[in-house]
Image (cartoon, rainbow, N blue to C red):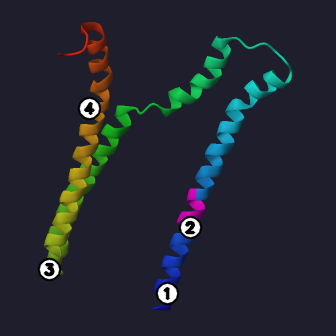
């Protein structure tokens, strides 16, 4: 019993430290990106709008969601779900009651994968639809 409590306590501590480290890392990265802009302002240099847009534009380009990443995640999730479904048959040879819960878990993971692929298609189609509406005008 003591080992289980220690394990879960250690797991939560690890997850908390990892989350805080990620937040600190993002903060430091943002500071390093804005440092040239801050240094130029402190020196009194005149900055044109193009330079500021170039320095700030890096952050905007990094935040854009690439649909390819969602598709890859979806494919991996679908493959993992199929693996869980196949695993359910092997485990059921030893523990017959475990087949349906594992099949359910596999189906859930497959649904997550399909959802990721659908989200990737929606993100990929959104800019095209927005450009079409701008060219044609709003629908009545």
At horizontal 20% and vertical 68% (from top left) the residue drawn is: 102
In the visual, does 98 lie left or right of 23?
left
The part of the image, by quadrant, that contains residue 41 is top right
Which of the two discs, 4 and 1, labels the residue nearer the N terminus? 1
- Helix, strand or loop status at disc 3: helix
Residue at the spot of label 3: 97
Question: From the viewer's perspective, is the residue at label 3 or at label 4 nearer?
Answer: 4
Residue at the spot of label 2: 14
Real-space Cα distance between discs 4 and 1?
45 Å
Give percent across and percent down for residue 19: 56, 57
Question: From the viewer's perspective, is the residue at label 3 or at label 2 nearer?
Answer: 2
Q: Residues within 10 Å of mark 4 (few under 14, many from 20)?
A: some
Residue placed most toward the observer, 44 or 94: 44
The part of the image, by quadrant, that contains residue 115 is top left
Give percent across and percent down for residue 79: 25, 51
In the visual, does 111 lie left or right of 8?
left
């Amino acid at each position: 019993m003591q080992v289980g409590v220690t394990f879960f306590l250690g797991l939560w501590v690890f997850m908390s430290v990892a989350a805080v480290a990620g937040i600190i890392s993002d903060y430091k990265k943002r500071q390093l990106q804005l440092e040239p802009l801050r240094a130029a302002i402190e020196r009194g240099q005149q900055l044109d709008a193009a330079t500021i847009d170039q320095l700030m534009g890096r952050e905007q380009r990094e935040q854009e969601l690439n649909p390819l990443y969602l598709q890859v995640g979806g494919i991996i999730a679908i493959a993992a779900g199929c693996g869980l479904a196949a695993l359910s048959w092997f485990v059921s040879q030893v523990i017959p009651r475990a087949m349906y819960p594992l099949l359910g878990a596999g189906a859930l993971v497959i649904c997550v994968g399909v959802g990721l692929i659908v989200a990737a298609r929606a993100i990929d189609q959104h800019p095209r639809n927005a450009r079409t509406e701008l060219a044609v005008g709003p629908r009545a």
